Image (spheres, grey):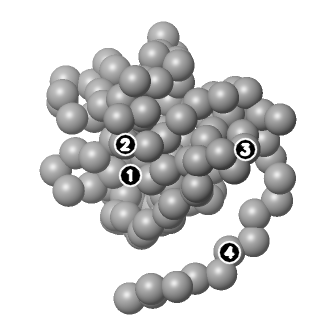
Amino acid sequence: MTYLENTHTTYDKLIAGVAVPVMTKNVTLKGDTATLKRGTVLALSNGKYEIVDTESETAEVKVANTVLAEDVELTGDDAVATVYTAGLFNPDAMTVKASGDTVLAHEEELRIVGIYLAKAL
């Protein structure tokens, strides 16, 4: 298990500032066949993370609580990925699953866990 990992991230306007310290952790993503982009908003359901989806029949998937820190290619099996658990993020650089959903609709849920939204500097 990796406890400390060096990462290199180019500036892509996802992180909106440093007023709130950025925190990360590794989590298990639910197996699927998809490409998830950095900035995807995730929810925890049955011990695994997946894209937040307000149209899901599963209540847990409707509640956002982390942000994907790196692009991930899912090939059907569960995968481990790094997520942001706290920080100040630009909602324009974030994505959610449902077409009628928006990142701003999850602002209060994210704020509860220490993820704040603001326009990039």
Q: Secondary structure at mark 3?
A: strand
Q: Secondary structure at mark 2?
A: loop
Q: CA distance from mark 2 to mark 1?
A: 26 Å
Q: CA distance from mark 1 to mark 4?
A: 25 Å
Mark 3 and mark 4 residues within 8 Å of each other at the beta carbon = no
- The mark found on residue 113 in the picture is 2
Q: CA distance from mark 3 to mark 4?
A: 18 Å
In the rendered image, is residue 33 in sight?
Answer: no
Amino acid at pointer 4: Thr
Which circle's residue, 4 or 2, is located before the other in the chain?
Answer: 4
Q: Of the residues tagged 1 and 3, which is closer to the observer? A: 3
How many residues crowd around disc 4 within 10 Å: few (fewer than 14), some, or many (20 or more)?
few
3 over 94 or under it: above or below: below
Quadrant (top left/top right/bottom left/bottom right) for the N terminus: bottom left
Image location of residue 32, percent across then percent down: 38, 52
**Residue receiving disc 3:** 17
Amino acid at pointer 2: Val
Q: Secondary structure at mark 4?
A: loop
Q: Nearer the viewer, residue 2 or 110?
A: 110
Amino acid at pointer 3: Gly
Which circle's residue, 1 or 3, is located before the other in the chain?
Answer: 3
Q: CA distance from mark 4 to mark 2?
A: 23 Å
* Residue lying farthest to the front in this orientation: 19
Q: CA distance from mark 1 to mark 3?
A: 32 Å
Image location of residue 48, percent across then percent down: 27, 55
112 horizontally vs 75: left or right: left
Which circle's residue, 1 or 4, is located before the other in the chain?
Answer: 4
